[in-house]
């Protein structure tokens, strides 16, 4: 069994900012906005809306979440990191190998506008174009 979709709830006051941040930060891995059933929710993804963002009325801080998106190569992770920081994210780990997880683990980490830890990771060895 695998996960069909994930929902991220953010305070209504930063909903639009957060959606735009994810669209900008995840554009390098192919994410786009598939559907907005109303002004308080949208479904993002690569092939289908499997990552949902919705607003909630409460303005208290969210309990931070760690989300990891899979990338096909290291270059995409570097592009994600640049795009995420340019969009206003906070650096939480520059692109690079993380051998403590396994020899081919390459990732970058950024904190989104709602305080969540967003990772883009590749589990393949680096391929160098000649």
Image (spheres, grey):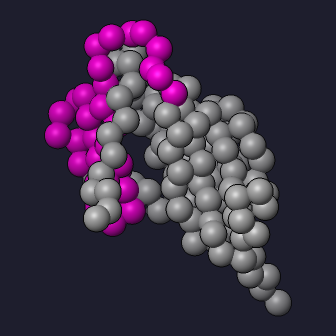
Res 76 visible: no
Q: Quadrant of the N terminus?
A: bottom left
Residue reaching furthest bottom?
130
Q: Is residue 62 highlighted in magenta?
A: yes
- State the image coordinates of residue 110 (x, y, percent, origin top left): 65, 39
Residue range (magenta): 35-64
Q: Is residue 47 highlighted in magenta?
A: yes
Q: Quadrant of residue 46?
A: bottom left
Q: Residue at x 62, y 43 (%)?
A: 84
Q: Quadrant of the C terminus?
A: bottom right
Q: Quadrant of residue 56?
A: top left
Q: Residue at x 57, y 59 (%)?
A: 28
- Does 62 sit above or below residue 77? above
Q: Residue at x 55, y 26 (%)?
A: 115
- Does 93 sit above or below residue 65? below
- State the image coordinates of residue 12 (x, y, percent, origin top left): 34, 18
Q: Number of numbered discs present?
A: 0
Q: Residue at x 71, y 37 (%)?
A: 92
Res 70 visible: yes
- State the image coordinates of residue 19 (x, y, percent, origin top left): 42, 36
Residue reaching furthest left?
37
């Amino acid at each position: 069994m695998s996960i069909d979709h994930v929902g991220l709830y953010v305070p209504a006051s930063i909903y639009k900012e957060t959606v735009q941040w994810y669209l900008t930060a995840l554009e390098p891995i192919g994410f786009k906005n598939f559907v907005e059933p109303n002004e308080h929710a949208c479904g993002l993804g690569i092939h289908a809306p499997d990552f949902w963002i919705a607003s909630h009325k409460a303005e208290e801080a969210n309990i931070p979440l760690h989300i990891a998106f899979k990338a096909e190569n290291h270059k995409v992770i570097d592009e994600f990191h640049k795009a995420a920081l340019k969009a206003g994210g906070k650096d939480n780990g520059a692109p690079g190998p993380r051998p403590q997880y396994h020899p081919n683990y390459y990732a970058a980490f950024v904190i989104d506008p709602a305080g969540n830890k967003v990772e883009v990771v590749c589990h393949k060895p680096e391929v160098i174009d000649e």
